[in-house]
Image (spheres, rainbow, N blue to C red):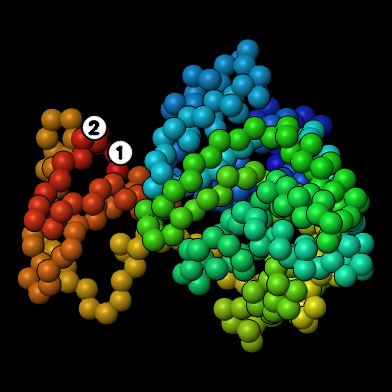
Amino acid sequence: GEALLSATDDGANPFDLVFFDQCFQGNLDILYEVRSAARVFVASPNYAWLVAPYQMYLPYFAPAATPEEMANAIIRIYQNRLTDGNPNAIFWVRGSDIGAIADAVSNLGDALRQALGAGKAPFILQAAQNGRYADTTQCGRGNLHLGPPDELIGAERLAENLRLRFSQVDADDPAVVAAATGLLQVLDRVPSTFRVGYPYIEPNEFWNYDDTITLLAPLLRETPAGIAWRASIYRPTVPLPAVWTPDPQQEVLITQPFAFVQDGRWDEFLAEWYTAPMTPTVGEWCNYVPPAVVISGTVEEIDLTAVPQQGGMRLAWSQPGASTPAAYHVLVRKPDGINEVLLAIVDATVQDYVVEGAANGTW
């Protein structure tokens, strides 16, 4: 955030477009932090798969194109490059609309605090648990299921669920309905594309995230700080000493709060929501390594040869001597890539694979 503000003279000379191409960047706290740095932001609220078709975006980055036109091209091209094995949501939002979205979230937080005082916590929890979750909290533990207790929830589905639940006779609350409706109205300005499906990294799970901007979710009220760790440090007060989950004996110091926590009121709702002691805690960040390279125990090596051929590269490998493979996974990395990309899964009876269109330096 500081780098973007410095590059734009504290937002006085904003970029036309900023594209966050990493996972989980489509979150209100992140966007609010940098809202003045660009006219339009593009981001994914959940997994951002490393397809990176930048050469396909370039023709749309014309001097006469508006930031909105360029953003529309990005979210359309990016989504079309994926398959249902890469479930994803991606959206764009105007920097000038982020403040209105934040205000609507604050208003919803105010209404939910009033509902809490009226004993309506079960209805809030029901609406939240039926929401759309982005996998951030549990994937650090190797759990790729979407849902509570993951802490990031889609704002639009949450607002829809709250409006529906608090319109019913047993939970009737016009203030919550009005605040949820107000949030839905401003979120209607956020165009998006999405696809749902069974992710290739965990094909037994169905990922159904079809929402846009994420918020911190109200989980079970008694959730401990080690699980709802983002909520435990979602405070305006600094410096804030915190426990570090990977090494509880090591203390970390949080020196700067989120701008939205300082300016908004969603944090005030969450502070009243949780009933367990919320010792400030920094949890394990979500990071992902393809399952094919997550190994333990003794690993058998096989010989691999790479021979250039017309328009590509032929890979050939030896058969393992001490084990019987179920399949071979061909993993590659771009010269400046940050992780491996699963290029192909080859039948166990085959011992070669041709990488087509692979000029020198592609992988």
Mark 1, Cα crowd under 10 Å, few <14 / some 14-19 / many 20+, is few
Q: Given contact means CB atoms under 8 Å apart, are the residues at marks 1 and 2 in contact?
A: yes
Relative image position of residue 261 (x, y in whole percent): 83, 58
Name the side, left or right, on which 194 lies relative to 184: left
Looking at marks 1 and 2 on the same chain, the residue that comes earlier in the sequence is marked by 2
Relative image position of residue 335 (x, y in whole percent): 35, 45
Mark 2, Cα crowd under 10 Å, few <14 / some 14-19 / many 20+, is few
Relative image position of residue 226 (x, y in whole percent): 65, 77
What kind of element bears circle 2?
loop
Q: In the rendering, which numbered label is found on residue 357? A: 2
Q: Find the residue positioned furthest to the top.
A: 64
Q: Residue at x 69, y 31 (%)?
A: 40
Between 318 and 111, the one nearer to me in the picture? 111
Relative image position of residue 245 (x, y in whole percent): 61, 78
Picture mark count: 2
Residue that numbered label 1 is attached to: 362
Residue 357 vertical position relative to residue 203 in the rendered view, above or below: above
Name the side, left or right, on which 83 lies relative to 124: left
Between 82 and 7, the one nearer to me in the picture? 82
| Amino acid at dot 2 | Gly
